[in-house]
């Protein structure tokens, strides 16, 4: 059997709740959301993290076999990082059981509610990065937009709460592994009559009650919790199960053109090409990268590269392609999509792509976390590219809702 090295991150997925407010016979995590269960959607996002992670699914004892089958199906080749176990009587007890299975090499632990089925993988990546940066607990959250009133037991309004001081917290919540271990040990040591650290509503509350700092980062609207029938319907609509539209793949095309500039270095497909004629532009003039960004923005319905970045932004002066691709990827993820695959064709007489094609594809694939194919052609001496006046590029991309299964990779 293959040996899997310990990852640095573990994700405990809590799927042991009954979900009584949803009004279904099955526990909430096993209720269908379109053709798949809520749990399967949630795990798709978890296994989409940018780095390998141990995934621990805590499920009801009666659904343990179903949970194991679902998790193994989503994990695929990453099944060696998967554990499934029965939960406890409370959420806190379930997380504690999951925490006991975290592997020795793990330094960051995320706790995620399976009910937040559409949570993008990018939110988990952001939480992991923030935990490492700060060294303490991190929760994602959204600003409270409604006016909030405090009321008494009879419903009489007592006052208005300052909503600028409030945030609606989500999961995954992340913590240094040692901090979370210590917080649960502190709670376990409390007397049975002391409720201060028992059965709190989330892990951040427990960690804070144990005396540790916790801060927030921006959450994601897609990370809402499926609690009621309306929440389930909202998730179905976002997936396109009711309309047959938004849950499907989206395709975008992009194009870019740059004239040669003998005073500049050439940057193309993310690579520096010493000794070749450079391209004019406010940034580095990388026509291939700009075409890819244009296609991604179009596919996600976010406009075009000129609208989003503009040529007047001084921060983009001489900026290289990675800057544009990274920001475009963030915007696409914020819109609820992930990149399926990318194809870009460079049109021009020079440089000769073939010797560096694999290098370009590897670089762009690493940035976009999706397969990228780079090709090149000439126009048989026709037009401005044929006359050697510049380079053009055409790109086509496919994106998917971030809760959909990943499409097959090009090498499968």
Image (tube, helix red, strand yellow):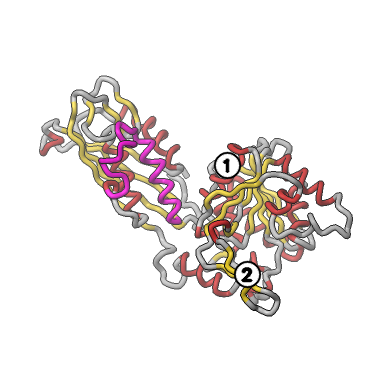
**Is disc 2 surrounded by few (<14), some (14 to 19) or many (20+) residues within 10 Å?**
few
Residue 150 has which mark? 2
| Region rendered in magenta | 307-336
Above/below status of 15 relative to 373:
below
Q: Residue furthest bottom?
A: 154
**Helix, strand or loop at mark 1:** helix
Quick check: can you spot residue 118? no
Q: Residue furthest front?
A: 159
Residue appearing at x 30%, y 40% in the figure: 313
Q: Position of residue 159 (x, y in %)?
A: 60, 69
Q: Quadrant of the N terminus?
A: top right
Residue appearing at x 17%, y 34% in the figure: 259
Q: Position of residue 402 (x, y in %)?
A: 48, 55
**Helix, strand or loop at mark 2:** strand
Residue 331 has which mark? none
The residue closer to the viewer here, 191 or 375, is 191
């Amino acid at each position: 059997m293959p040996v899997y090295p310990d990852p640095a991150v573990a994700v405990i997925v809590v799927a042991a709740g009954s979900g009584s407010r949803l009004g279904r016979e099955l526990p909430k995590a096993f209720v269908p959301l379109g053709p798949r269960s809520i749990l399967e959607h949630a795990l798709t996002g978890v296994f989409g993290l940018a780095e390998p992670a141990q995934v621990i699914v805590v499920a009801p004892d009666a659904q343990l076999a179903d949970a194991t089958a679902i998790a193994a199906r989503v994990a695929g080749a990453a099944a060696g990082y998967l554990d499934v176990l029965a939960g406890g009587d409370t959420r806190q007890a379930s997380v504690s059981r999951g925490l006991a299975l975290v592997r020795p090499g793990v330094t960051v632990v995320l706790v995620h509610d399976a009910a937040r089925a559409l949570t993008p993988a990018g939110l988990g990546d952001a939480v992991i990065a923030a935990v490492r940066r700060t060294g303490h607990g991190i929760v994602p959250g959204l600003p409270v937009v409604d006016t909030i009133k405090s009321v008494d037991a009879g419903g009489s309004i007592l006052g208005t709460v300052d909503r600028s001081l409030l945030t609606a917290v989500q999961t995954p919540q992340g913590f240094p592994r040692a901090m979370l271990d210590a917080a649960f040990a502190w709670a376990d040591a409390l007397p049975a009559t002391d409720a201060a650290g028992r059965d709190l509503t989330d892990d951040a509350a427990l960690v804070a009650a144990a005396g540790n700092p916790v801060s927030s980062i921006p959450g994601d609207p897609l990370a809402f919790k499926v609690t009621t029938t309306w929440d389930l319907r909202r998730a179905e609509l976002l997936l396109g199960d009711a309309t047959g539209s938004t849950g499907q793949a989206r395709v975008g095309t992009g194009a870019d053109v740059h004239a040669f500039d003998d005073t500049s270095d050439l940057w193309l497909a993310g690579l520096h090409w010493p000794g070749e004629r450079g391209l004019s532009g406010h940034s580095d003039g990388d026509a291939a990268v700009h075409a890819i960004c244009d296609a991604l923005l179009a596919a996600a319905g976010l406009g075009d590269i000129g609208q989003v970045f503009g040529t007047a932004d001084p921060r983009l002066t001489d900026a290289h392609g990675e800057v544009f691709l990274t920001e475009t990827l963030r915007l696409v993820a914020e819109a609820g999509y992930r990149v399926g695959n990318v194809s870009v064709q460079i049109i021009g007489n020079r440089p000769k792509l073939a010797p560096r094609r694999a290098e370009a594809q590897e670089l762009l694939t690493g940035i976009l976390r999706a397969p990228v194919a780079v090709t090149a052609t000439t126009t048989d001496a026709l037009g401005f590219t044929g006359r050697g006046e510049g380079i053009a590029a055409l790109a086509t991309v496919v994106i998917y809702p971030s809760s959909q299964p990943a499409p097959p990779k090009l090498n499968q």
